[in-house]
């Protein structure tokens, strides 16, 4: 594949495009711009909700961002949500009731649009007092469809909690994890970064074979498999989780070593 060229460049943000200090390397921005001048668009694909995409617009001011692990499409230029694939009220109520019964120490939050709601006992790690963030009861949070349900446990290990959530949720929804602690992200059944990127490609007349996608955490695996099996390039960062490395077609340097820039430069 030495002469392969992408038709679309897509990247995860945290641990991938962003360095540890949450900046984007000048070399990476230069590569994105160079490919953009050649007509190759750049798309962000992240577990982050839209409200966490404000800062990235300073360096990537336009284009599409696939947010909430594929559930939300965000127009970066207009900063508008253009589409959401939501978790239904029925599934929300069944999943939250099942998890609370199986492990009473499970606490919940939800993402939808530019809003975030969390139970009073739920401990957000970021933007506690930010706009769009507010406390709510569980009954209030599951009364309408949401883009993403978050479940957190403060005592169980990450591995124990993921196993518990997988067992309770079953095939009702899609379970992913992009955190080092016991925080699980639950999307509508079948919704992943892969479905989000597939939607973007369909709008542009492209397929997985045209995509190079960079990632580092388990919530990137579905997109890696879609790109890899479709004939594109699924590129794991040098700092990637073992599950991501196992699904990759290629491995680049770490995010702090400008791995995205170095791989893109190798394709010229």
Image: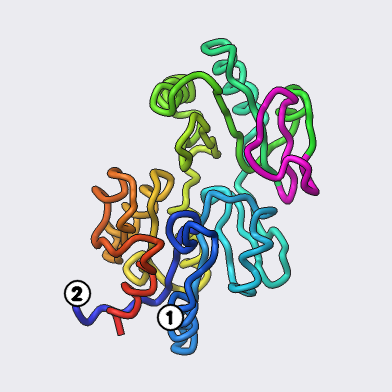
Mark 2 — residue?
1
Viewer-proximal residue among 155 and 234: 155
Quarter-of-image position of residue 157: top left
Q: Secondary structure at mark 2?
A: loop
Distance, label 2 to label 1, CA atoms, is 20 Å
Decide whether residue 61 is among the magenta residues: no
Viewer-proximal residue among 231 and 53: 53
Q: Secondary structure at mark 1?
A: helix
What range of the chain is rendered magenta? 113-133
The number of numbered badges drawn on the structure is 2
Mark sitting earlier along the chain (2/1): 2
| Residue lying at 28% horizontally and 44% vertically, measured from the top left | 242
Q: Residues within 10 Å of mark 1 (few under 14, many from 20)?
A: some
| Residue lying at 55% horizontally and 23% vertically, measured from the top left | 153
Mark 1 — residue?
31
Q: Residue 76 location in percent, x, y?
A: 65, 68
For residue 213, side relative to residue 181 (left or right): left
| Residue lying at 53% horizontally and 37% vertically, measured from the top left | 185
| Residue lying at 60% horizontally and 28% vertically, measured from the top left | 91
Decide whether residue 131 is among the magenta residues: yes
Q: Residue 86 location in percent, x, y?
A: 63, 42
Viewer-proximal residue among 258 and 91: 258
> Marks 2 and 1: which is nearer the front?
1
Prevailing SS of the magenta stretch: loop
For residue 16, side relative to residue 146 (left or right): left
Contact check, label 2 and label 1, Cβ < 8 Å = no
Extreme left residue here?
2
């Amino acid at each position: 594949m030495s002469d392969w060229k992408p038709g679309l460049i897509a990247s995860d943000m945290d641990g991938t495009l962003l360095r540890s200090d949450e900046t984007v390397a000048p070399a990476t921005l230069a590569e994105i711009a160079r490919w953009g001048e050649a007509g190759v668009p750049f798309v962000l694909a992240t577990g982050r909700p839209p409200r966490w995409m404000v800062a990235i617009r300073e360096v990537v001011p336009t284009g599409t961002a696939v947010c909430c692990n594929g559930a939300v499409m965000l127009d970066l230029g207009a900063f508008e949500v253009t589409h959401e694939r939501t978790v239904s009220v029925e599934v929300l109520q069944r999943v939250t009731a099942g998890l609370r019964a199986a492990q009473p120490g499970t606490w919940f939050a939800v993402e939808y649009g530019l809003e975030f709601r969390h139970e009073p006992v739920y401990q957000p790690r970021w933007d506690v007092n930010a706009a769009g963030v507010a406390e709510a009861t569980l009954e209030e949070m599951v009364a309408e469809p949401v883009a993403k349900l978050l479940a957190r446990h403060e005592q169980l290990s990450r591995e124990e909690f993921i196993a518990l959530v997988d067992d309770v949720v079953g095939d009702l929804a899609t379970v992913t994890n992009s955190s080092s602690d016991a925080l699980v992200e639950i999307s509508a059944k079948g919704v992943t970064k892969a479905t989000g990127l597939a939607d973007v490609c369909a709008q542009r007349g492209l397929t997985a074979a045209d995509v190079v996608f960079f990632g580092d955490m388990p919530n990137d695996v579905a997109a890696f498999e879609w790109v890899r099996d479709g004939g594109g390039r699924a590129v794991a960062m040098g700092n990637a989780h073992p599950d991501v490395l196992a699904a990759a077609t290629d491995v680049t340097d770490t995010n702090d070593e400008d791995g995205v820039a170095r791989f893109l430069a190798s394709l010229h």
